[in-house]
Image: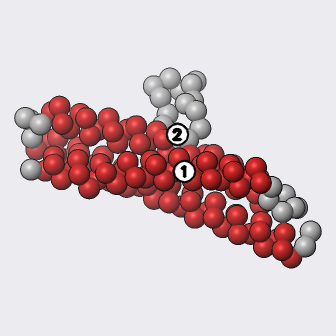
Amino acid sequence: MTDADLQAQFDLALQVREKLSEVNDGVRRVHEAQQKVAKIEQGTSGAAPQVAAVKEKLRTIEGLLTRIPGRNPLYLPPKALDNKLAAFSSQVAGREARPTKQMYDVFAYLSQGADDALRQLAGVIDKDLPALSK
């Protein structure tokens, strides 16, 4: 394994770590938004349909970003982006070779999914939450 191979491996591992951090930050922001919606829900009674719609959007985004346990403890929902990125990180770092083209393709795919979910979250936080507060 050459120095260039090690550098390529390090660079990809760093990109994966940064994307995983963005996803984890997104999960934190979803939880903060859910708390704000709960406070708004307690203070108002007339905005129930709008509150329910925002809660559903946040729940959907949270499900894209992280695994949400269901009601049945024996059933685990599919792995979400945080699990996939964490597992992928170990695949990148665990090899003693330059990352393959397929690894870059997988990272691009996971990154696109994360970016889409985070964009949706930004829309809810920037548009839907302020509309509820009015």
> Which amino acid type is marked by label 1?
Gln
> Residue 96: x percent and y percent?
88, 61
Identify the residue under disc 2: 67
As measured in the structure, the alpha-carbon distance from the residue carrying label 1 to the one carrying label 2 is 18 Å
Residue 52 shows up from this direction: yes
Q: Nearer the viewer, mark 1 or mark 2?
A: 1
Within 10 Å of disc 2 (Cα), the crowding (few <14, some 14-19, many 20+) is some
| Residue 31: mark in rendering | none
Position above or below: 33 against 21: above
Q: Is residue 56 left or right of residue 44?
A: right
> Residue 76: x percent and y percent?
57, 30
Q: Compare marks 1 and 2 and give the one earlier in the sequence.
A: 2
Front in this rendered view, residue 4 or 130: 4
Q: Residue at x 16, y 48 (%)?
A: 131
Q: Residue at x 61, y 48 (%)?
A: 109
Identify the residue under disc 1: 112
